[in-house]
Amino acid sequence: MRNKGISDSIQDWQLTIDAARADVTITKELAKQGYNADRMTEGVGLVSEFKEQQQAYQQAIGDQCGATDALQLAQETANATYIFHVKIARLAIPKDRDLWRTLQLNGIREKSLNGWLEQTESFYNNLPEALPLMKNHGVTAASIEQAKEQIQAVRDARVSQTHRKGATQISKQQRDETLARLEEWMEDFIRTAKFVYAKNPQQLESLGITAG
């Protein structure tokens, strides 16, 4: 399967199984080698199980991407408010005040999410002390609380993204385990079919199996 995509291989394997089950003569010959009705049903079940899990995995990837987009949007929204308040604070607070250091008004803004969260939360936890200096610029206790809620929304979005990442990993693991079982089943089935029809390559071709 290394030279093929998973979807192509699954389609080929389903075609092989369906063709074998549809031909009474082939069914009887393969049953003599252990591939009776129950064994063939097992193969059908593995294909169906894999398809369901592949669909679930694709859905999980979509959910994870959605959670990542939501996190990015939440942080962009909160950061726009934060930068606005930083600019107002720099304008309203005399530079020689200790508040400059407390609010981290000098220096760069943190880029990593953890650093950003720490910096913004520290800023807003200490900002009420500067409120008397900033109220003439439209900053109120209510606007500070609103900014805190936006930061909490970022935290919540990160939790959701982490959950979605975990769900995607679990879904992939389940799919891969089923794929491994299906690959093992198909490898044995193909070996058996080649043994049964070693002198009849046309029958192998009817199953979608290349002789050799």
Image (tube, rainbow, N blue to C red):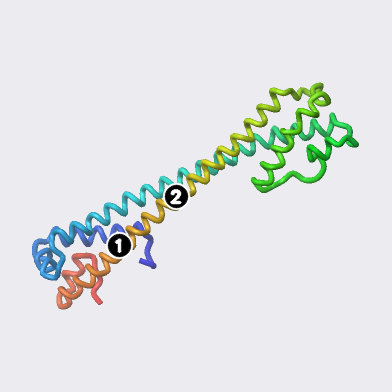
Query: Vertical placement of 23 versus 87: above or below?
Result: below
The image quadrant where one finds the N terminus is: bottom left
Mark 2 residue type: Thr
Q: Is residue 212 left or right of residue 95?
A: left
Q: Helix or strand or loop: what does disc 2 sit on?
A: helix
Residue 137: give x, y in percent of width and height.
80, 24
Name the residue nearer the viewer: 12 or 124.
124
Name the residue furthest right: 96
Q: Is residue 12 left or right of residue 164?
A: left
Residue at 20% across, 73% down: 194
Residue 173: give x, y in percent of width and height.
40, 56
Q: Helix or strand or loop: what does disc 1 sit on?
A: helix
Residue occupied by mark 1:
181
Q: Earlier in the sequence, mark 2 or mark 1?
A: 2
Residue at 18% across, 65% down: 206
Name the residue nearer the viewer: 30 or 126.
126
The image quadrant where one finds the C terminus is: bottom left
Q: Residue 175: which quarter of the image? A: bottom left
Q: CA distance from mark 2 to mark 1?
A: 20 Å
Mark 1 residue type: Arg
Q: Residue 33: which quarter of the image? A: bottom left
Name the residue nearer the viewer: 194 or 120.
120
Given contact means CB atoms under 8 Å apart, are the residues at marks 2 and 1 in contact? no
Residue occupied by mark 2:
168
Q: Residues within 10 Å of mark 1 (few under 14, many from 20)?
A: some
Query: Vertical placement of 49 versus 133: above or below?
Result: below
Residue 53: give x, y in percent of width and height.
34, 51
Q: Residues within 10 Å of mark 2 (few under 14, many from 20)?
A: many
Residue 128: give x, y in percent of width and height.
76, 28
Q: Residue 25: which quarter of the image? A: bottom left
Q: Is residue 201 left or right of residue 62?
A: left
